[in-house]
Image (spheres, helix red, strand yellow):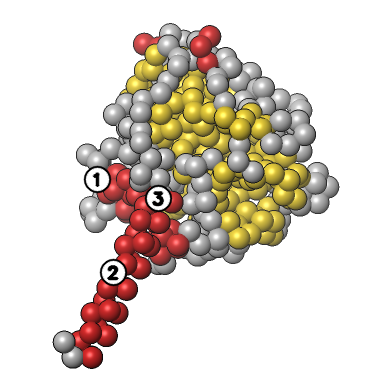
């Protein structure tokens, strides 16, 4: 064997080893080697058929109603002639009924005309007035946050559209007043260019932005796909799910400046999505345990994607406990994006499936077993 051929073969072998190691590392980071065994310690789950992509759920516990944002993402991303005309909606579901009577009723207003809702947040003022804020992807490179007034009889009235150069790829929103909010950017630019490589490398390039009613500013940066966001009930803390880092981040909120100071971080080992804060202060987080499988499911509905709901119970002085409340390989509902609670109910939304899953937790899930968080 001549020297040149030998060097070439050595280089090829090294490249193959490095590529294989990178592949294994990437698949491991995306959870593809995680075993999925069905887990739910509650009583039963009911699949409530509705519309494709009921991705986020906000619950008004004083009224016993769930507000759901949905649009057909697969059709919108396809080459189908009708893709450009996809319009999503907001739906309401009465939770104080027997399971057989659960259904999603549309309450979508006429405005804005181009409406593809994503993350949502419900804010209730001291006088009882309600505001629903909705991340919207009208089409192309435009991304907005829509602000609606919500009446006592569930009529949505569009109040204003917020569009800002810093809101480049919004995913979720957390309202802190009728006009102000935090919003996560799940990428650092509009459009799809570069997103795949950023996901593979888990690039820390995304942000949290605060909008004060007039202007916006970045309050957190260097996150590996900022996804769900929520506030504690007293609004002293802000929770952010970092999907590609599989991490929950907790910030102290300054009520005067709205600045966020990191106070805790928890590695949860799964692709964390939207966050619901329960009445007892626990966090219920929809998650994607296998992210590469989730990507396959995005293009092929026949390819199931596991669903998971994580419960995080923060401790008063920091740290906390985490457990899995629900886990399934995707046969009941694929690609869960949120798990929101009301009484003994757990409402699970999905990124693509045309349904939500409503699970009765019963007494068996009042205090689920927990494992310490990894700080």
The residue to which callout 2 is attached is 16
> Residue 26: x and y, percent?
39, 56
Percent position (x, y) of residue 248? Answer: 59, 43
Point 49% across, 42% down: residue: 269
Q: Is residue 192 at all visible to an observer of this figure?
A: no
**Is tag 3's residue or tag 1's residue first in the polypeptide sequence?**
3
Q: Residue at x 83, y 47 (%)?
A: 256
Say whether marks 3 and 1 touch (CB < 8 Å): no
Residue lying at 39% horizontally and 33% vertically, measured from the top left: 307
Q: Position of residue 266 (x, y in %)?
A: 61, 42
* Residue denoted by label 1: 300
Q: Nearer the viewer, mark 2 or mark 3?
A: 2
Q: CA distance from mark 2 to mark 3?
A: 18 Å
Horizontally, is 294 left or right of 126 in the view? left
In this view of the protein, can residue 327 be seen by the observer? yes
Q: Quadrant of the N terminus?
A: bottom left
Q: Residues within 10 Å of mark 1 (few under 14, many from 20)?
A: few
Of mark 2 and mark 1, the one earlier in the sequence is 2
Are the residues tagged 2 and 1 within 8 Å (C-beta)? no
Please state which of the two labelled residues, at mark 3 or mark 1, is closer to the viewer: 3
**Secondary structure type for disc 3:** helix
The answer to which of 23 and 306 lies nearer the viewer is 23
The CA span between labels 3 and 1 is 22 Å
């Amino acid at each position: 064997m001549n020297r040149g051929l030998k060097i070439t073969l050595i280089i090829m072998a090294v490249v193959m080893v490095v590529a294989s190691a990178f592949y294994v590392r990437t698949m491991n980071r995306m959870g593809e080697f995680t075993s999925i065994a069905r887990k739910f310690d509650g009583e039963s789950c009911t699949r409530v058929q509705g519309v494709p992509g009921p991705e986020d759920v906000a619950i008004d516990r004083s009224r016993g109603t769930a507000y759901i944002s949905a649009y057909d993402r697969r059709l919108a991303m396809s080459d189908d002639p009708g893709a450009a005309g996809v319009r999503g909606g907001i739906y309401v579901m009465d939770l104080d009924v027997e399971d057989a009577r659960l259904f999603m009723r549309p309450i979508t207003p006429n405005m804005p005309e181009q409406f593809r809702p994503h993350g949502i947040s419900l804010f209730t003022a001291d006088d009882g007035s309600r505001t629903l804020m909705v991340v919207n992807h009208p089409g192309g490179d435009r991304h907005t946050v829509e602000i609606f007034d919500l009446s006592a009889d569930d009529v949505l009235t569009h109040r204003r559209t917020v569009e800002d150069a810093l809101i480049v790829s919004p995913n979720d929103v957390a309202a802190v007043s009728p006009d102000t909010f935090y919003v996560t950017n799940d990428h650092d630019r509009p459009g799809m260019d570069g997103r795949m490589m950023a996901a593979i490398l888990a690039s820390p390039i995304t942000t949290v932005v605060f909008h004060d009613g007039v202007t916006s500013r970045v309050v957190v940066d260097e996150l590996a796909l900022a996804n769900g966001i929520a506030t504690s009930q007293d609004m002293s803390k802000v929770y952010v799910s970092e999907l590609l880092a599989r991490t929950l981040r907790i910030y102290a909120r300054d009520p005067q400046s709205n600045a966020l100071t990191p106070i805790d971080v928890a590695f949860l080992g799964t692709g964390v999505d939207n966050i619901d804060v329960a009445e007892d202060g626990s966090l219920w987080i929809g998650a994607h345990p296998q992210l590469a499988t989730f990507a396959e499911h995005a293009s092929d509905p026949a390819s199931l994607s596991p669903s998971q709901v994580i419960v995080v119970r923060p401790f008063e002085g920091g740290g906390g406990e985490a457990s899995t409340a629900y886990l399934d390989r995707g046969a009941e509902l694929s690609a869960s994006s949120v798990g929101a609670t009301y009484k003994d109910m757990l409402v699970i939304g999905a990124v693509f499936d045309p349904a939500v899953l409503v699970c009765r937790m019963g007494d068996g899930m009042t205090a689920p077993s927990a494992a310490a968080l990894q700080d």
